[in-house]
């Protein structure tokens, strides 16, 4: 078992007072582009000198009870009049030097950068300032200013702060275009690793579009520029002195840099920062669908040449496409002109789109490509709506199955969905289709995690209402030479998912 850990690059320690920061003081002349040798930059001194004044150290503090601190031991309950009472009072209550309570300070050290000198706007990571009582911004010349929180976004781990621009002459940097960065391009990170402010490290873009499972919009730039704890929120610069990433996380077995660091690309961060500055919150586009990956089996079942796009597993009631524009079983392969190569691409490009925008969506429906027009809703409103419904599209409501016997197919026993079976499996009234009453052990259906009580609503994107319908659809697919059957299953509460089952 590997000991490698994914760590946020911020550093947090338990301190009874205010921690001292080691801050470098560097003059800030006009920027001069660095020169590059055949094997890399000959020097980044001019680049560093031009941007160091805009990079800041973030210091936060939070008051917590002693019993809530890391590794804290609760005070034991002693009998009244115990001779050990005074001893434990001294040890537990007064060990922080405060006889009235056991509160202590949790100190967090991170990095950030100024993007607007006139307004005093500073960008950092949300996890650097999360739950902080006080936030201070420390500049490279030793000046410290109090900061107020403008807004945060936990989904991308971005936070925007504001300091008084009259309190200090500020130097700002600007966002560059991260989409132009190529693997192998030189980059420079600046930050506050382990409290050592003004630290400059150089490396290259090791990879792009990394998904490290930290959030729904993961699209990280990977770099081998040294990033350590305390670098969180600091900028990653291109050779032109533009911010193309916000340093956020590292992979490390020891907590120190091993050359695997991750930065939020400016393409994603810049839009979030603009929304936080304007509204104090994010306002993302929302399509109102539940999606799942398009596997090779699903692609074959849908008649697609290659596995690509995002498969719509359900449509949220009351959402932007609850009018039939997009249906369960559709595969979205292009959104507003942007190709959807895999499922995780769709949430990101939708979220980056303005609320209320009308966009063209290219879908594959029953093997045929077609373009539909969709007007986006707001994700933040949609999350509330989605949490209160089950995602069923209602497209099969009203189908009435005649009384028939059960049938056995693909390792499943299926039967009529009537009052008796609804009660037996606690199936919601608005779920329709053919109920699965039994799944044979070691069958193809069992391998896919199919369980009794689930309801088959569609096979190969055609509705089924009786066990005979199921048999007929499977038979037709076999005659067509299909190796897999694509089933749309509804849970007892109506949540939809797609599975493919081998038919050989």
Image (cartoon, rainbow, N blue to C red):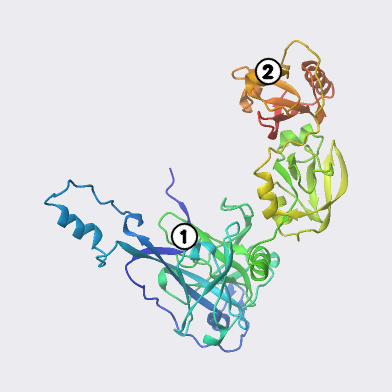
Residue that lies at the very extreme toward the left in this rendered image: 83
Residue at numbered disc 1: 258
The quadrant where residue 265 appears: bottom right
Of residues 166 and 24, the one nearer the viewer is 166
Residue 318 position (above or below residue 406):
below
Query: Horizontal and vertical percent for residue 192?
Result: 46, 72
SS for callout 1: loop
Of residues 318 and 53, the one nearer the viewer is 318
SS for callout 2: helix
Of residues 336 and 382, the one nearer the viewer is 382
Residue 414 position (above or below residue 484):
above
Query: Horizontal and vertical percent for residue 230?
Result: 45, 67
Q: Residue at x 68, y 40 (%)?
A: 389
Which image quarter is the N terminus in? top left
Report the disc number at residue 421: 2
Residue 114 position (above or below residue 222):
below
Q: Is residue 412 left or right of residue 404?
A: left
The quadrant where residue 324 appears: top right
The quadrant where residue 304 appears: top right
Which image quarter is the C terminus in? top right
């Amino acid at each position: 078992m590997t000991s490698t850990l994914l760590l946020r690059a911020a550093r947090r320690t338990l301190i009874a007072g205010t921690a001292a920061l080691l801050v470098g003081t560097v003059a800030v002349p006009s920027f001069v582009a660095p020169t590059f040798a055949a094997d890399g930059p000959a020097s980044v001194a001019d680049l560093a000198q031009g941007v160091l004044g805009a990079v800041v150290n973030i210091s936060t503090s939070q008051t917590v009870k002693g019993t809530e601190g890391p590794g804290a031991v609760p005070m034991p309950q002693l009998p009244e009049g115990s001779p050990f009472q005074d001893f434990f009072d001294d040890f537990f209550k007064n060990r922080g030097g405060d006889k009235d309570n056991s509160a202590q300070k949790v100190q967090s050290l991170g990095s950030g950068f100024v993007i607007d000198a006139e307004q005093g706007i500073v960008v950092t990571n949300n996890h650097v300032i999360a739950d902080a009582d006080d936030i201070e911004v420390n500049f490279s010349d030793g000046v410290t200013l109090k900061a107020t929180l403008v807004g945060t976004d936990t989904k991308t781990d971005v936070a925007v702060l504001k300091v008084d621009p009259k309190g200090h002459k500020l130097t700002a940097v600007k966002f560059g275009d991260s989409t132009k960065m190529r693997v192998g391009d030189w980059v420079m990170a600046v930050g506050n690793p382990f409290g050592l402010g003004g630290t400059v490290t150089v490396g290259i873009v090791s990879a792009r579009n990394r998904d490290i499972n930290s959030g729904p919009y993961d699209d990280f730039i990977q770099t081998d520029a040294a990033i350590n704890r305390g670098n969180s929120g600091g900028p990653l610069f291109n050779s032109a002195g533009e911010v193309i990433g916000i340093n956020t996380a590292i992979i490390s077995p020891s907590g120190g840099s091993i050359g695997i660091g991750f930065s939020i690309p400016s393409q994603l961060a810049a839009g979030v920062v603009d929304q936080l500055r304007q509204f104090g919150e994010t306002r993302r586009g929302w399509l109102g669908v539940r999606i799942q990956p398009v596997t090779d089996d699903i692609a074959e079942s849908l008649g697609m040449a290659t596995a690509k796009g995002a498969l719509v597993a359900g449509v949220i009631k009351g959402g932007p496409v609850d009018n039939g524009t997009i249906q369960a079983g559709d595969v979205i392969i292009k959104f507003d002109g942007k190709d959807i190569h895999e499922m995780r691409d769709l949430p990101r490009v939708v979220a980056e789109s303005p609320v209320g925008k009308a966009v063209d969506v290219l879908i594959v429906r029953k093997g045929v490509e077609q373009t539909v027009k969709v007007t986006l809703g707001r994700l933040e409103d949609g999350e509330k709506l989605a949490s209160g419904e089950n995602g069923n599209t209602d497209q099969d409501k009203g189908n009435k199955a005649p009384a028939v016997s059960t049938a056995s197919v693909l390792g499943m026993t299926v039967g009529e969905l009537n009052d008796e079976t609804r009660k037996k499996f606690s199936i919601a009234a608005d779920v329709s289709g053919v109920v699965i009453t039994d799944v044979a052990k070691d069958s193809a259906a069992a391998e896919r995690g199919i369980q009794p009580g689930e309801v088959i609503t569609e096979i190969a994107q055609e509705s089924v209402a009786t066990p005979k319908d199921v048999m007929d659809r499977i038979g037709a697919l076999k005659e067509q030479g299909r190796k897999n059957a694509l089933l749309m299953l509804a849970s007892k509460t109506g949540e939809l998912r797609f599975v493919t089952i081998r038919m050989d």
